[in-house]
Amino acid sequence: MSAPPTVSVLGYALLGLLARGDQSGYDLAQGLKDPVSFFWFAQHSQIYPELARLEAARLVRHTVVAQSERPDKKVYSLTPAGQQALESWLEAPAEVPRMRDEVVLKAYSLWLTDPYNGLRLMHEHAEAHAHRLAEYERRLELLLKKDDIHRPDSPWFSVYSVLMRGIGYERSYLEWCRWMVERLEGAGKS
């Protein structure tokens, strides 16, 4: 028996998208932009080489679909081996992510600069996180109209769960930015 193929996290993201249905490379790229990019980022240029690796490992296959006014396209589907690999990955433990956040790193050394610089930084990031929070909440409002978002065996439940994580994260980050703004404004007055 041969060893199971090594699959990257991007590969598992693609397998997870294909578990929802057959998709072209373009469709997969769109799926990685929205909603996957809210919690996992990949360059567009990484997708097709990763699909080739998944296909070489027999985890996905493609069919060619002829198009009249465009070049033919490949539509990818998950193979039974791909489904099994995805399920095995889902059952394996996951590492606790280590944070890499430049804004937090800057806050760590903020005492070395004029409070105005920190205030500007925190205002910018408060605005960015408020905007992202509003977008997530808008998406949640639309998602709540689906009947099966509370069923753990539904793909919509998975979308709901990661959206709720994103909302919690954005609320927390926004609260921290606003707290920092209050402290830095207070420092400028003293």
Image (tube, rainbow, N blue to C red):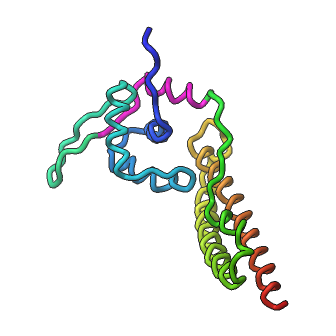
In this rendering, position of residue 22 left or right of residue 93? left
The N terminus - image quarter: top left
Relative depth, front residue between 93 and 112: 112
In this rendering, position of residue 58 left or right of residue 149? left
Residue in the image at 68% along x and 79% along y: 113
- Residue farthest right in this picture: 190
In this rendering, position of residue 77 left or right of residue 120? left
Relative depth, front residue between 146 and 37: 37
Residue 64, relative to residue 188: is it above or below?
A: above
The C terminus - image quarter: bottom right
Residue in the image at 39% along x and 47% along y: 28
In this rendering, position of residue 44 left or right of residue 178? left
- Residue farthest front in this picture: 112
Relative depth, front residue between 159 and 185: 185
x then y, percent, for residue 44: 37, 52
x then y, percent, for residue 179: 79, 74
Place residue 106 in its image quadrant. Answer: bottom right
Query: Any magenta on residue 115?
Result: no
Query: Any magenta on residue 87?
Result: yes
- Residue farthest bottom in this picture: 189
Residue 67, relative to residue 60: is it above or below?
A: below
x then y, percent, for residue 8: 47, 36
Q: Give the dominant element type of the magenta stretch: helix, strand or loop.
A: helix
Count of residue discs: 0
Residue 106, relative to residue 164: is it above or below?
A: below
x then y, percent, for residue 171: 72, 65
Which segment did they paint magenta? 75-90
Residue in the image at 51% along x and 54% along y: 37
